[in-house]
Image (cartoon, grey):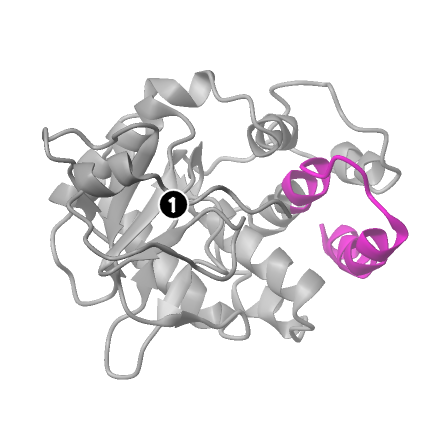
Amino acid sequence: MTQSPAPPASVLRAFGATEAPVLLPGGPGSAWLAGELVLKPTALSQETVWRAGVLCHLPEVTGFRVARPVPSADGSWAAHGWEAWQLIGGSPDPHRADDVIRAGEEFHATLKDLPRPRFLGVRDTPWARADRLAWQETDRAPEFALLKPLLAACRPISAPAQIVHGDLLGNVLFEPGRAPAITDWPPYWRPAAWASAIVAVDALCWYETDPALLERWSHLPDWRQLLVRALIFRIAAHETLDDAAESEYRPVVDLVLDSA
C-alpha cells in the first residue's frame, strides 16, 4: 500500500491547522492528523462537496455519531486537493459486526429521503466498477473463477435503493459510553441492507466471524441475494485475486451459494 504525501503548508494554512501532520494508521494510508483535524486527499470534488454538505447538516441523534467536515478559510469544502474533518474519538472493532450493522441501519434511516447524487454516474474506481457489476449494470467482469457462480446466482430483488455507506466494518468507531461513530463514507445508491451484507461478508471473510451472523440478519429484505452481490462487489474490486485472497473468499462464497 502506497503512503500518500503529507499535506503541504498551503493546505494546513487553508484549514487553520497549526500542528505538524502525522500519518494516521489504517485505511489506504492517505489520512493525516494535524491537531484536531483529519486531512485527506480529495478524490472526486463533486463527491467531497456533496458528502460534506450532507454531514454538516445531519441532525444529532442518539444511535450514532459522525465526523463533521471542516471548511477551508474561503468557506469551501476542499482546498488544494485536500479536505478536512473533525477528529472523532473511538477505534474500529471488526469483531463487533452486529453492532456495526445496527449503527449502519440507524445511519441509513436518516438518509433514506436523499435524492441520488449525480456524481455516482461518473465515478470510475475499481470499487465503482465492481458495484456496477454486482448490480448487473455492466457485463465487464474480471476473469476470476469465484465470480462465475455468483453472477449466475443473481436474481431480481425488490428492496428500494437509497444512499448507503459501502464500507462500514472498518469505519465504525467504538468508544466506551458513547454512540458508535461512522467515518470515511463512500456513498453508493443501493438497498440499505446491501451495506449490512457487505459488513457480514467482510466479517466472515477476513475476521473469522461465526457464520451464525448471516442467520441473525436473515430477516432483512432480499438478504441472500444481497450477500451474493456483496461478494461480487468485494471480489471484483481486486486487480488480481491471489491464492491467499481466494482461500479467504471461497468458504463464504460456498456458504452463501448453498443458501441463496
Residue placed most toward the observer, 100 or 24? 24
Q: State the image quarter where residue 228 is shown.
A: top right
Identified at 67% across, 37% down, the residue is 237
Residues shaded magenta: 231-260
Is 156 covered by the magenta stretch? no
Q: Residues within 10 Å of mark 1 (few under 14, many from 20)?
A: some
The residue located at (17%, 67%) in the rendering is 62
Rendered view: 189 above or below 217: above
Compared across the picture, whether 159 is left or right of 257 comes to left
Along the horizontal axis of the image, is 216 left or right of 190? Answer: right
Residue assigned mark 1: 185
Image x and y of residue 162, in percent: 36, 35
Q: Residue 106's image quarter?
A: bottom left
Answer whether residue 102 is visible to the viewer in this image. yes
Outermost residue, bottom side: 176
Numbered marks: total? 1
Q: Quadrant of residue 40?
A: top left
Residue 29 image point, x, y percent: 52, 50
Instruction: Please provide percent x and percent y for residue 204.
Output: 67, 65
Q: Is residue 186 depicted above or below 168 in this figure?
A: above
User: Could you tell me what secondary structure mostly forms the magenta stretch?
Assistant: helix
- When the figure is inspected, residue 44 is found, relative to residue 92, above or below; the finding is above
Is 245 covered by the magenta stretch?
yes
Residue 196 versus residue 14: which sits nearer the camera?
14
Q: Secondary structure at mark 1?
A: loop
Q: Nearer the viewer, residue 67 or 246?
A: 67
Query: Residue 111: image x %, image y %?
Result: 26, 42
Three-letter code, disc 1 = Trp
Taking the image as shown, residue 98 lies to the left or right of residue 146, namely: left
User: Residue placed at 38% from the left, 32% from the top?
Assistant: 42
**Residue at x-position 89% and y-position 52%:** 243
Q: Is residue 112 visible?
A: no
